[in-house]
Amino acid sequence: MCCINTEMTLTRKDIERITALGFSKRAFLFKTDDGFCQLKNIEDHCFFYDPITKKCKIYDSRPEGCRYYPVVYDMRKRKCVADRDCPSRETLTRLDIRKVCHKTKRLVETLVREARYNETTC
C-alpha cells in the first residue's frame, strides 16, 4: 500500500543514487509547485513499484523517505509520528518511531533546505 499513490519527496542524494542505476530524472521525478522533487506515479503507483511482483524495482537503492516510512516528521508538532494514511500504522510501537525519528527529522530538514535553496534539480 505504501507505493500506491505515493507522495515521496527526494533528496539530491536520492536522485544521484537512482540516476546512477541508469534511470533518467525525467522518467521518475517531477518538481512540485513549492520546489520539492517528488517521485512520479504511473497508473496510480510509484514509478518503481512492480504491480506484478508487488516489489520495488530499486529496493536496495530506494529513497531515504521510503526507508523510514511510515514514520514521518510532523513539523508543526515538532515530533515523529506514524503516517495516518498508512494502513499498518497501528503496528508501530513508540520504540519503532523513536529508533528512526532523528533520521526522519534530519531528512525533512534536508528536503526543506534543498527546496528553499534550489539545491536539488528535478
Image (cartoon, grey):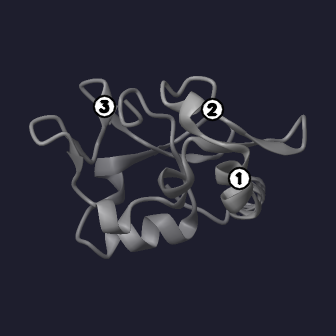
Q: Which mark is residue 45?
A: 3
- Residue 83, percent from left and from top: 63, 32
Contact (Cβ within 8 Å) of mark 2 with mark 1? no
- Residue 74, percent from left and from top: 79, 38
- Residue 101 is drawn in which quadrant? bottom right
Q: Of the residues shown, which amino acid type is indicated by label 2?
A: Asp
Residue 115 visible from this viewpoint: no
- Residue 11 is drawn in which quadrant? bottom right
Q: Which residue is mark 1?
A: 95
Q: Which residue is mark 2?
A: 83
- Residue 104 is drawn in which quadrant? bottom right
Packing grade of label 3 (10 A; few <14, some 14-19, many >=20) is some
Residue at figure coordinates x 30%, y 24% from the top left: 44
* Disc with the residue nearer the chain's start (2 vs 1): 2
Front residue of 96 and 107: 96
Does residue 75 appear left or right of residue 17 in this picture?
right
Q: Of the residues shown, which amino acid type is indicated by label 1?
A: Leu
- Residue 38, percent from left and from top: 50, 44
* Disc with the residue nearer the chain's start (3 vs 2): 3
Residue at figure coordinates x 27%, y 60% from the top left: 58
Residue placed furthest toward the right: 77
